[in-house]
Image (spheres, rainbow, N blue to C red):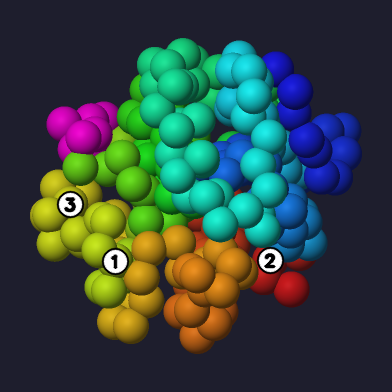
């Protein structure tokens, strides 16, 4: 499985598993990985679509969303969980602490991974598969942070939040789905900035590094 990495596996720092949106390990995901590495983490982002053919995407394509959803529908979810857990196990083998961060498709995948493999921390941005995964909630023992946009027409926060127990929940009144993605179709600058500050603070509290939130 191809895996992108930021930082050095040999450094004495916790590891983060970063899980992609349906658009793959895009430039946006790579930027977020670099942002996490700047906080002091060793970060890996596996190519979850690696078992599929014809997964190239062009962000300028007017049919981007339809094509990306078509790719995601071809994915074997259980196999994707297994692959992501293998990546998390690699991080765990370093003995430095582990967390998983996921966006949209990856937010749901990260939640599923946390239920079956117990990282130290979970950050899920508007996990699109959450409504189908709520029966796993009691198995998620990691310190957890969830971000939801109240203007999200794809994922209704009120339908999932009650099942998330004592997870830290933040809602953004004017934000829609994928509000952290910089594509103009999705982006909400204020929500993105605030959610990122909260993410950095949460990770500093539950998976601290020598850099903290600097």
Q: Which mark is residue 160?
A: 3
Nearer-N-terminus badge (3/1): 1
Front residue of this view, candidates 123 and 204: 123
Q: How many marks?
A: 3
Nearer-N-terminus badge (2/1): 1
Q: Quadrant of the C terminus?
A: bottom right
From the viewer's perspective, tell me whether residue 24 is left or right of residue 111. right
Q: Name the magenta segment's main secondary structure.
A: helix
Res. 122 visible in picture: no
- Labelled pair 3, 1 in contact (Cβ < 8 Å): no
Front residue of this view, candidates 147 and 15: 147
From the viewer's perspective, tell me whether residue 111 is left or right of residue 95. left
Which residue is tagged 2? Answer: 212
Placement of 53 over or under 56, stated as above or below = above
- At 80% from the left and 38% from the top, the residue drawn is 5
Which of discs 3 and 1 lies nearer the camera? The answer is 1
Residue 88 highlighted magenta (yes or no): no
């Amino acid at each position: 499985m191809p895996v992108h990495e930021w930082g050095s596996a040999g450094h004495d720092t916790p590891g983060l598993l970063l899980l992609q949106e349906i658009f793959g390990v895009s430039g946006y995901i790579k930027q977020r990985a670099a942002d996490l590495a700047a906080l002091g983490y060793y970060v890996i982002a596996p190519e979850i679509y690696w078992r599929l053919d014809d997964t190239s995407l062009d962000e300028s394509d007017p049919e981007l969303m339809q094509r990306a959803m078509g790719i995601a529908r071809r994915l074997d979810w259980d196999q994707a969980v297994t692959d992501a857990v293998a990546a998390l196990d690699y991080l765990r083998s370093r003995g430095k602490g582990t967390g998983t961060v996921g966006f949209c498709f990856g937010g749901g995948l990260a939640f599923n991974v946390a239920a079956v493999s117990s990282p130290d921390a979970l950050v899920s941005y508007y996990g699109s598969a959450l409504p189908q995964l709520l029966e796993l909630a009691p198995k998620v023992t990691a310190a957890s942070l969830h971000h939801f946009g109240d203007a999200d027409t794809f994922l209704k926060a009120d339908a999932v939040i009650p099942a998330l127990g004592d997870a830290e929940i933040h809602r953004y009144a004017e934000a829609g789905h994928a509000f952290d993605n910089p594509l103009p179709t999705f982006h909400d600058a204020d929500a993105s900035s605030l959610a990122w500050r909260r993410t950095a603070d949460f990770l500093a509290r539950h998976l601290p590094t020598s850099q903290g939130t600097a």
